[in-house]
Amino acid sequence: MTDTPAIELKGISKSFGPVQANKDISIRVMPGTIHGIIGENGAGKSTLMSILYGFYKADSGEIFINGNKTEIPDSQAAISAGIGMVFQHFKLVQNFTVLENIVLGAEDSALLGPSLSRARKELQKLAEEYELNVDPDAVIDDIGVGMQQRVEILKALYRGADILILDEPTGVLTPAEADHLFRILEGLKREGKTIILITHKLREIMEITDTVSVMRRGEMTATVKTAETSPPELAELMVGRKVLLRVDKTPAKPGEKIVEVRDLNVTDDKGVHRVKGVSFEIHAGEILGIAGVAGNGQSELLEVLGGYEIATGTVMIRGEEIDLTGSKSDGRSRRLRGISHVPEDRQREGLIMDYHAWENVAFGYHYDKKYGAGPFMNHKAIREDTEGKMKRFDVRPPDPSLAAKSFSGGNQQKIVLAREIERDPDLLLVGQPTRGVDIGAIEFIHQEIVRLRDKGKAILLVSVELDEILGLSDRIAVMFDGKIMGERLPSETDERELGLLMAGITDTKGAHGYEEVEDHLAESHGDVR
């Protein structure tokens, strides 16, 4: 292996107004290695990679590719330098075929026929060489996310990439698909490709990378060989203090039945059957976790229970039936019944980003007598209440007058959690509680959810993170294609079994490979993207 880095960044700095996203960053990535970059939300990882791929121009610093100083003013220059990037949200034209997507932007001439013919031959060669088999004539809209990710990688390789940047590549994959992706990356490494992996999952860093660089607040704090570090050490480098990486909780002590759901069905406004005959129950003092790939009915389930979606079936709260027909199916009636809801998308559903923190804390609870009477709101009382919530939930900065958009993602999530948990609900609905949240905030959020459970409350947790589901849940139900495929105790299952259930395979005791998982996902592609 050569001593010349495939990539070397020297003194890279980048500011957006008063915010310095990158500060004097230097990093060396050796050829034929998988180099991980981790850091808290807002640490500057994506900005740094966007500079390398030509989306942003650095205020200062130099870029060297294979030892040669290289100017990268745009993404075309990056592609010409042999750099490809696979984004977290795929850049594919949904109604084009695989082949058309791969050729798009890299045509040989105005005549598309010769380009497609040449691309088909090259695609077959690349697919065989790197285990990236995919039907070139399949329409993107008709294939699952695992296949779509392969198309993105093939697209980069077709353009001659020797350096691949992958941004949070496993966020939409089942465990089996993630394992297959890692095998692909290992194959690319063996062929001499250089890979930069941006991820927040420490387990993935430890499993697949050779070297890992840690960023904190726009600066590079450390670069270490993966074999010579550990998840606790990396977490401390990211946050600046020791972090508890496991959920610390005692066994559940379930009490009375709080929630009973029977034969719940949801059909969306396009006529698609999203939730299909779902039944379950939750008792006081326990957390029921719902695992599954995004798009399998979990969101609709939360919306029904939260009062934002019409459904058929039966939902009982403390033995009393809830109206699901829409006449009384609204958020306020649910809140009055002791149901609090932390939605999956805090920015679109949990907050109004341009409004003050104190206004957001009052949303949904403005009828509370302590906030005022009739049409008149007591702003002073709301601000004081918000200050107390911010202090208890360690929201930074603890300033109620700041707009929601002025807080980091983790602190925005804490504002929503403070508003809902402090209502002392009988049932807490919580969707993706730590999505896009820093490791330090994850630890705090998990502690608050467990604290509420230990007060005898019922909690329905929806998360795509299996570590989170296994760590927090007292019971786990797995959803696939709108149905519950099975229920497990965390102590009696593992990620492999849950991953198979997430792919629609109920015979989890047999030996199933990735291809079988992929077949199941492909059959129901419309619901798992």
Image (cartoon, rainbow, N blue to C red):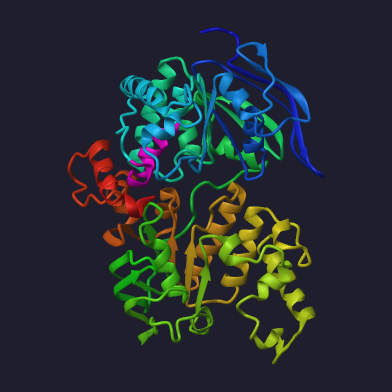
The residue positioned 47% from the left and 58% from the top of the image is 249
The residue positioned 63% from the left and 61% from the top of the image is 414
Which of the 4 image quarters holds residue 131?
top left
Percent position of residue 43, x then y: 67, 40
Query: Which is more toward the observer, 447 or 84?
Result: 84
Query: Which is more toward the observer, 285 or 89?
Result: 89
Residue 299 visible at all: yes
The residue positioned 37% from the left and 40% from the top of the image is 146
Residue 207 visible at all: no
The residue positioned 58% from the left and 66% from the top of the image is 350
> Which residue is farthest front?
111
Q: Which residues are magenta?
A: 139-152
> Which residue is farthest right?
18
Percent position of residue 227, x then y: 50, 24
Asked if residue 50 is among those painted magenta in the image, a careful observer would answer no
Apparent side of residue 285 relative to residue 486 in the rendered image (left or right): right
Q: Is residue 446 above or below residue 110?
A: below
Apparent side of residue 43 relative to residue 176 in the rendered image (left or right): right
